[in-house]
Image: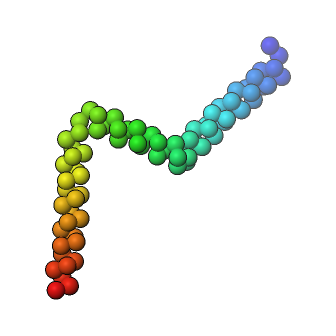
Amino acid sequence: MTELQTVDARVLEARHELAATLDAIGDRFNVRKQAARLGERAKESFSRNPTPWVIGGVLAAAGIVAAVTYSFVKKS
């Protein structure tokens, strides 16, 4: 392999690495893909152990009820 072929091979390899890096960056900043991944992770987490999700839901509902009740009591 000549020196020119070696340089060409390196340039081609660098282009492929750059393309892969740009694809990874694009995936990172793609909001739809990230939201889909987050949704899948949440589904898997719930499937493995729903207890924390149920407790979190109950606490969130209790917080909303407390906030609404407080706003009505404060107005009186």
Which sits in the foreground, 44 or 10? Answer: 44
- Left or right, 37 with respect to 43, comes to right
Residue at image x 56%, y 46%?
30
Residue 20 screen position, x and y as percent: 63, 33
| Residue extending furthest toward the bottom | 76
Residue 17: image quadrant is top right
- Left or right, 75 with respect to 36, comes to left
Q: Is residue 23 placed above or below 69 in the rendered structure?
A: above
Residue at image x 21%, y 46%?
54
Quadrant of the drawing holding the C terminus = bottom left
Residue 59 screen position, x and y as percent: 19, 56
Residue 25: image quadrant is top right
Residue at image x 56%, y 41%?
27
Residue at image x 75%, y 23%?
9
The answer to whether residue 3 is visible is no
Q: How is the image coloured?
A: rainbow
Quadrant of the drawing holding the N terminus = top right
Which sits in the foreground, 30 or 13? Answer: 30
Residue 44 screen position, x and y as percent: 34, 35
Q: Is residue 44 placed above or below 9 in the rendered structure?
A: below
The answer to whether residue 17 is visible is yes
The number of numbered badges drawn on the structure is 0
Residue 4 screen position, x and y as percent: 83, 22
